[in-house]
Amino acid sequence: MRAAISDIDKAAGVLRAGGLVAIPTETVYGLGANVEDVAAVARVFQVKGRPPSHPLIVHIGSAEQLGEWVTVVPDTARLLAERFWPGPLTLVLRRGPRVPLEATGGLETVAVRVPDHSMALALLSAFGGGVAAPSANRFGSVSPTTADHVRAELGDAVDFVLDGGPCQVGLESTIVDATSETPSILRPGGVTREELEAALGSQVSVGSTSRVRVPGQHPSHYAPRARVVLVEPEALLTEVELAQEAGHRVGVILPPSLADAPVKTHAVVAVPRSMAAYARRLYGFLRDLDQLGCDLIVASLPPEEGLGLAIANRLRRAAGPRSTT
Ligand code: AMP
Ligand code: MG
């Protein structure tokens, strides 16, 4: 989808004036602000209801600009940027002086990426600076993958919504700690562990081995209103039956292995066989099941390889314990 030039100019003007723009990317829609404008950055946290200690990702227009935002670019970070940008890979590096601590939750590191979407790139080029953009949803809820999701959830709190159609990856970026020469995955996402390992020629670990602090990785996140329960595929039909007997309005995310199973329940969505298609539609499924009035969603985890690693991560966190406050 192509935006009229005037839309891009208008969005760039809103950013320059300290406003907030909803930006289409290949991962999810972002809620963007000029990263160097601390008042605009503060509004992002306020609109999302996000604790200020949770750092934002800074979006830039090209890999060549990376040096403007970080103090050191290790060789491996350079290699990853050249291989995967524009694309769903976020690199955590040492924060340069142009990035205010307000955007990094007080950390001396900053997360940076170049999004792979023509409209986002046109906006970054017209604006010229860095755009701090977390997902354009309220804190803890499901990330938006269409402009309508953003309008429905944030409404007038956003000054301008750029409609770039449905997001093509549909899940957030892979976040990699690239501060050292042995990068590790802090959050799985649109670039797979296997792709990173092929690019680096070495194994890449996932999780907490990194020295950098990773705030904002709460167990409950990416969550629909309905409670999410994860079960093994063999136990899924029984779980659904029991939950219905207990009076729940059950939504089922039906794995491919059960595609022909006779499920009688409030709502059913079938998992596509392609992992890329599943990633693209996962958040839409969660939103749809909420919309249909389900109070319980039963799902199984996909095999945790390729994009399955990120899908399983989001499903686990959607099913994570919720705060009652
Ligand atoms: P969101 O924008 O909500 O999709 O999430 C951005 C996520 O990026 C945060 O929740 C952090 O986990 C991660 N992140 C951003 N900046 C940093 C950083 N400097 N160090 C580690 N993780 C970061
Ligand atoms: Mg988010």
Image (cartoon, helix red, strand yellow):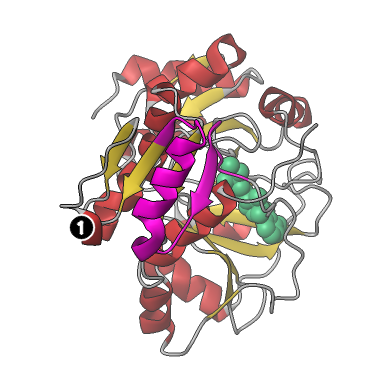
User: Residue 87, can we see it?
Assistant: no
Query: Height in image: 169 above or below 187?
Result: above
User: Residue 15, can we see it?
Assistant: yes
Is 24 positioned to the left or the right of 166 in the image? right
Report the quarter where the N terminus lies. Answer: top left
Q: Which stretch appears magenta?
A: 221-250
Residue 103 percent across, percent down from the top left: 74, 42
Give 192 or 130, whichever is nearer the viewer. 192
Mark 1, residue position: 273
- Classed neighbour count for the residue bearing mark 1: other residues with Cα under 10 Å, few (<14), some (14–19), many (≥20): few
Magenta-colored stretch includes residue 237: yes
Magenta-colored stretch includes residue 41: no
Is 5 positioned to the left or the right of 227 in the image? left
Residue 277 percent across, percent down from the top left: 25, 50
Which residue is at a point 53% across and 20% down the rendered structure image?
153
Which residue is at a point 71% across and 36% down the rendered structure image?
36
Tell me where residue 59 sits by quadrant: top right
Tell me where residue 94 sits by quadrant: bottom right
Query: Height in image: 39 above or below 187?
Result: above
Report the quarter where the C terminus lies. Answer: top right
Residue 300 percent across, percent down from the top left: 40, 58
Query: Height in image: 219 above or below 324?
Result: below
